[in-house]
Amino acid sequence: MKKGKKFFQRLTGWLTALTLLAGSAVGYYHYTLPDQFRVTAGTKLRLNQTGLSIIDTVNKKEITASALKSANQNYHAQLMLFDVIPIKTVSVKVVQEKLLVPCGTPFGIKMFTNGVMVVGVADIESAGKMINPAAVAGVKVGDIITEVNGKAVTQNSQVAKLIESSAGAPVELSIKRNEETLTATLTPILSDVDGSYKGGLWVRDSTAGIGTVTFYDPSNGSFGGLGHGICDVDTNELMPLRSGDVVSVTISGIVKGQKGRAGELRGYFNNDFPVGQLQANSEGGVYGTLNSSPVSTEAIPLAVKQEVKTGAAQIYTTVDGTTPRPYGIEIESINYQDGTKTKNLVVKVTDPDLLSKTGGIVQGMSGSPIVQNGKLVGAVTHVFVNDPTRGYGILAENMLEISEKTSLESTEKAS
C-alpha cells in the first residue's frame, strides 16, 4: 500500500514538473517567435526549434509544401509544441522566391535633409546680456525645422537669412519632433558681435559618408545598404531624407579595430558623378536605385527568417580597392521577434585573413551581406566596441520589406 502511495506521489511530482516545463516552453516560444511568417511558394514552412510544428487552423493538419504552392496566399495557422500543446496563432504569407545579388561593394552617400536639423542651441550676447532665443522658444536639439514664417526651408543659409531679415520681429517655426508637428515662435535678437539678428540655432542640412551595398535587385534596379539608418553625428537622430546621390568609392586604408576602439575603412569618392539615387533613410538602412549592378555576381535566393540558422556563414565585404570577397563568420544567435527590425543577429568574425586585416568588424563594413547555405540571410550592421570580432546584423527579410515599401512609395509618387 505504501509503495503504491509513493508511486502516485512520484507520478504526481513528475506530471507537475512536466506541466511546469511545458508551460515555461510555451511562454518562451510565444514571446521569442514571430506572429508572422513568410514562406516561399512550393516550400514547406519549417522551424529550426525541436518539437515545434505549424498546423492549419482550418483542416487541423500540418501545412505542407503542396498547400503553399501559390504565391500571394495568406493562412492563419496554429504554432504547436509536440503537435499537442498550442502556443499561439500566427499568420503565414506565401511569396514568390526573391532573387537578389549580394554585393559587399563600398558606396559613397551624399544626403540632403528634408528640412534642417537642429544640432545645437547657443547663447547670443545682446546688449551685454547672454540670451538663448531658441531655448526660450522651446526649440530642442534633434528638431527638424521645415518652415520659417510659412516658407519651406531645406538649407542652413535659408534659415539664417529669414531670421536675420526679421529685424527682431518674431518668426514662426514649423517643427517636426519625433512623430509630432509643432509650431514655435522665436524672437531673434541683435548680436553685439556682428550687429545682425540671430536665433541661437545651429542647424545641419546635409551629410556624406561611406557604407556597403547589401543587395541589388535585378528585377527593378533597387538596392539596399548599410542595414542601419544615417543619423546625425551630434544628435544621433535619424536624418530625414529629401534627396541623395550614390557615388562610387575606392577603399584606400584600414584602421584596425581593437578592444575599446572601433576601427574603420578609409576611402575616397572616385568622382562626383552619381551612380544611383537615395529614396529612403530608415532605421533598417538606406534604399534607392542604382544605374546597374555594382558586381557581376549571380543573384541568389533570399532566405526568409525561419531559414536562418546559427552556425557557419560568410560575409562579402571590400577592405581594399573596389572588389568584395567572402570571409568566414559564425552566426551566434538569432532574434526572430516581429518588433525587432534591426539587430536580429549576433555574428562573430572567424576568418583569419579578415581578422589580420581589420581586427574584425569596422566602421564602413555596415551593410556587408551575410550568405548562408547559398542564400542571402542578412547584413552586418554594428560592431561591439569591447570585442571588435563580434557585432550585430539585420535579417535580409526585414531589409527586403523596407525596400519593397520604398519602391512602392516611389512608384506612387511618380504616378
Image (spheres, rainbow, N blue to C red):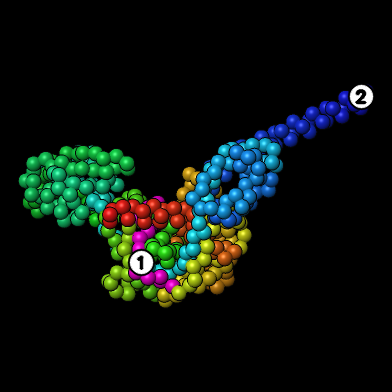
Residue 271 drawn at (x, y percent): 29, 74
Quadrant, the N terminus: top right
Q: Quadrant of residue 251?
A: bottom left
Q: Residue at x 13, y 44 (%)?
A: 149
275 in relation to 80, above or below? below
> Is residue 388 or residue 406 the one in the foreground?
406
Q: Which mark is residue 290?
A: 1
Q: Residue at x 59, y 64 (%)?
A: 373
In this rendering, the label closer to the viewer, 2 or 1: 1
Q: Amino acid at mark 2?
A: Lys
Q: CA distance from mark 2 to mark 1?
A: 80 Å
Label 2: which secondary element: helix
* Residue 166 placement, left or right of 134: left
Can see residue 193? no
| Residue sitting at x 20%, y 54% | 154
The segment highlighted magenta reads 280-295
Residue beneath disc 2: 2
Type of amino acid at the residue the image marks with label 1: Leu
Magenta span has 81? no
